[in-house]
Image: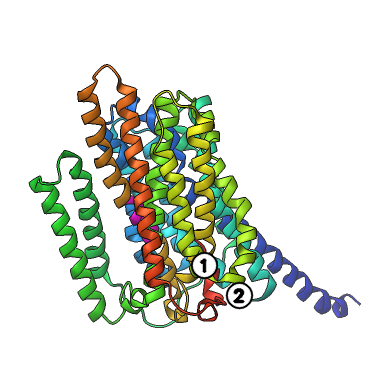
């Protein structure tokens, strides 16, 4: 009797165990996504205290954010290739371990330079983590309702990660210390490592694979040089080092394009970005990144330095935009098949620009509920109109073998756009605040506010440019732009 029942029951138990293991793997991979996204915002609230303790200049303060976004964005394409070729679980585990070590290094940093290096290392290891997690999710949930559910959970975590970062940063900075905004990652990393060992299965891309090291080096150095050149612009646009680094960045990026056109297995196949609609979507992703990363950093400064909010209150005060986005997304998702993506891609930046222009009207003695809150609400409505269609447009018509590169490109565009935008905004802020301080040295808050106002106005202009890009590039009948295929399951990181 025992022998006859065993073959019948064992396979059922095995299937049940494998089924449960997949959902535990989803929890682990979603946790990874949360860590990667929230670390893009968690330090924003902590920056004023970190600047005081470590004696950071305004330029160094900006690099605490830029170093993470730049390393993440510049290395994301290479990280995806490493995950495919070397092994996705192996890359995931190494990325998680390195991210934790970099977080500890940043948490105990004794100088601004150490903190900036730590943030760059966090971004580099995040560039391993993010594509490995997405690829593991893709091969774990291959079809049907379960796949849709898994990607919905993963995407929801990505959408809430920035808000969690702001709240958690406020709580840790106010009740513990700004350093815990980095050290808290140790707990996430420990859970991710244990969960990865227990529930994640190894996988690799088939066939013979070669790394495009020449492309990786030129694009990374090119983007770094470009961003550094924009950073140096706070000392003057006509300075030799400003012009030199900007020119070097352009030359290196041109070399990257030449390399990608010639190598057999390019880091970024040019056909991915030369598609009109996809190319437009990447440009708009860059615009979104510049406004979101640059704008939220200076919003945190205004709330704490000018309005005098505590870190926790500042974190809560930053949330209305995220709440509005989450409220609007279900309605916009239902509207999308009716009107198509093009009207949303044009209207979204225009609405967001109105919100940013509203924020540019801040004054030193202003009120949060009249000068800040309405702008955040309007900005949230505009961003919701962008977030729903832009990821799908970034992957529309892409060949299956290019889906990973296209998804990485979309995420890289956002991070690099944020890096460049923040560098430019910092240069504009410094020039405006310095000029205002010379006019009235006795009113430092007025100088700060003038600088923040210029940042918000500049971000609004970037959004107007985004509307023009959408009008020019996002063309075609509604039926041609929809429905979106399986590749649309890839979600935005950071």
Identify the element where label 1 is drawn: loop
Residue name at image x 42 percent, y 50 percent = 353
Dot 1 or dot 2, earlier in sequence: 2
Q: Quadrant of residue 255?
A: bottom left
In the image, 108 versus 463, the foreground residue is 463
* Residue under numbered circle 1: 490
Q: Position of residue 180 (x, y in %)?
A: 47, 33
Q: Is residue 420 visible?
A: yes
Q: Position of residue 194 (x, y in %)?
A: 57, 52
Compared with 107, 78 (above or below) is: below
Compared with 56, 11 (above or below) is: below
* Range covered by the magenta-colored residues: 412-419
* Residue under numbered circle 2: 142
Task: Say which quadrant the N terminus sits in.
Answer: bottom right
Compared with 101, 96 (above or below) is: below
- What separation in Å lies between label 1 and label 2 (alpha carbons)? 13 Å
């Amino acid at each position: 009797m025992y022998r006859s029942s065993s073959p019948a029951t064992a396979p059922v138990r095995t299937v049940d165990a494998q089924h449960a293991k997949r959902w535990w793997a989803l929890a682990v991979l979603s946790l990874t996504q949360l860590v990667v996204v929230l670390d893009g915002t968690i330090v924003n609230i902590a920056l004023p205290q970190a600047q005081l303790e470590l004696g950071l200049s305004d330029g160094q303060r900006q690099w605490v954010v830029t170093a993470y976004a730049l390393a993440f964005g510049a290395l994301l394409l290479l990280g995806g290739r490493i995950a495919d070729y070397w092994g996705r679980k192996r890359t995931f585990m190494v990325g998680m371990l390195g991210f934790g070590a970099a977080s500890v290094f940043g948490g105990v940093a004794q100088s601004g330079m150490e903190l900036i290096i730590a943030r760059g290392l966090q971004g580099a290891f995040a560039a391993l983590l993010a594509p490995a997690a997405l690829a593991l999710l893709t091969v774990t949930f291959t079809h049907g309702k379960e796949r849709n559910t898994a990607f919905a959970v993963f995407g929801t975590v990505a959408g809430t990660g920035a808000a969690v970062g702001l709240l958690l940063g406020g709580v840790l900075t106010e009740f513990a210390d700004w350093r815990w905004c980095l050290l808290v990652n140790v707990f996430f990393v420990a859970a991710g490592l244990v969960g990865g060992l227990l529930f994640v299965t190894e996988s690799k891309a088939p066939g013979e694979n070669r790394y495009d090291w020449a492309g990786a080096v030129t694009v990374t150095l090119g983007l770094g040089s470009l961003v550094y050149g924009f950073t140096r612009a706070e000392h003057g646009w006509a300075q030799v080092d400003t012009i030199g680094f900007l020119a070097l960045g352009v030359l290196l990026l041109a070399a990257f394009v030449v390399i990608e056109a010639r190598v057999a297995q390019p880091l970024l196949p040019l056909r991915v970005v030369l598609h009109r609609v996809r190319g437009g979507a990447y440009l708009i992703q860059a615009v979104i990144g510049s406004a979101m990363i640059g704008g939220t950093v200076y919003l945190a400064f205004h709330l704490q330095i000018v309005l005098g909010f505590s870190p926790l209150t500042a974190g809560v005060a930053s949330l209305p935009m995220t709440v509005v986005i989450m409220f609007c997304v279900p309605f916009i998702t239902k509207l999308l098949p009716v009107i198509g993506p093009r009207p949303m891609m044009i209207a979204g930046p225009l609405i967001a620009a109105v919100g940013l222009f509203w924020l540019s009207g801040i004054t030193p003695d202003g009120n949060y509920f009249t000068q800040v809150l309405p702008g955040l609400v309007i900005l949230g409505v505009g961003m919701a109109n962008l977030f729903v269609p832009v990821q799908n447009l970034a992957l529309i018509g892409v060949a299956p073998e290019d889906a990973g590169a296209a998804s990485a490109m979309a995420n890289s565009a956002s991070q690099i756009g944020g890096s460049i935008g923040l560098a430019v905004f910092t240069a504009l802020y410094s020039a405006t605040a310095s000029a205002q301080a010379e006019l009235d040295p006795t009113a430092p808050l007025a100088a700060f506010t003038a600088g923040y106002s210029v940042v918000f106005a500049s971000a609004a202009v970037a959004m107007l440019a985004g509307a023009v890009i959408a009008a020019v590039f996002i063309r075609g009948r509604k039926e041609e732009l929809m429905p979106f295929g399986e590749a649309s399951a890839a979600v935005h990181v950071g």
